[in-house]
Image (spheres, rainbow, N blue to C red):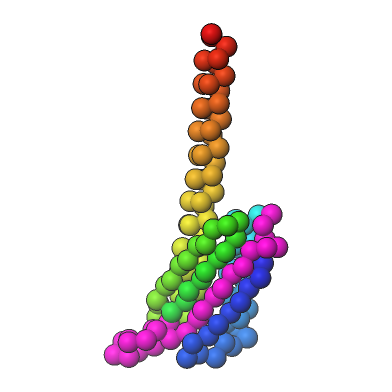
């Protein structure tokens, strides 16, 4: 998977980079065979307009694979919490997308079966 990381108002530390890479490895399981052509764009940084609440961190993932684009964004009080939240959201979207394809394939198969059954009765 081609991973691009962008930071805003934040310098990515090696610890944060390792943590991010570990979390993004979980996405590979859901992408499957398209992992080589998938592109994941990650943006991490301080959230704007939250100065009265202290350090508020923002993480965003744009995942492009198999002709679809998935996007998730999270705002949390720590960098790691924002990364976890955005990873969970992307995984939820990937699972939904997989279920949609399975459901459409099953509906198409059922329609074909009904059609063939109707043709044999004539």
Q: Position of residue 55 (x, y in %)?
A: 39, 88
Q: Position of residue 87 (x, y in %)?
A: 51, 67
Tell me the residue at 37%/86% (across/down). 48
Q: Which residues are magenta?
A: 33-57
Tell me the residue at 32%/91% (across/down). 51
Q: Position of residue 14 (x, y in %)?
A: 63, 86
| The quarter of the displayed image where residue 15 is located | bottom right
- Is 2 one of the magenta-colored residues? no
Callout count: 0
Is residue 102 visible in the rendered image? The answer is yes
Is residue 81 visible in the rendered image? The answer is no
Q: Is residue 33 left or right of residue 110?
A: right
Q: Position of residue 74 (x, y in %)?
A: 42, 72
Q: Is residue 49 left or right of residue 29?
A: left
| Quadrant of the snapshot with the N terminus | bottom right
- Is 41 one of the magenta-colored residues? yes
Question: In this view of the protein, which residue sits in the foreground, 42 or 116?
Answer: 116
Question: In this view of the protein, which residue sits in the foreground, 3 or 55?
Answer: 3
């Amino acid at each position: 998977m081609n991973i691009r990381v962008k930071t805003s108002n934040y310098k990515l530390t090696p610890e944060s980079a390792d943590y991010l890479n570990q979390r993004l490895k979980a996405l590979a399981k859901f992408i499957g065979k398209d992992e080589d052509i998938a592109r994941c764009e990650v943006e991490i940084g301080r959230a704007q307009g939250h100065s009265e609440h202290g350090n508020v961190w923002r993480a965003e993932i744009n995942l492009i694979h198999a002709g679809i684009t998935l996007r998730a964004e999270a705002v949390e009080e720590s960098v790691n919490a924002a990364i976890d939240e955005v990873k969970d959201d992307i995984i939820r979207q990937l699972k939904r997308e997989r279920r949609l394809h399975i459901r459409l394939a099953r509906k198409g198969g059922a329609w074909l079966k009904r059609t063939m059954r109707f043709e044999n009765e004539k």
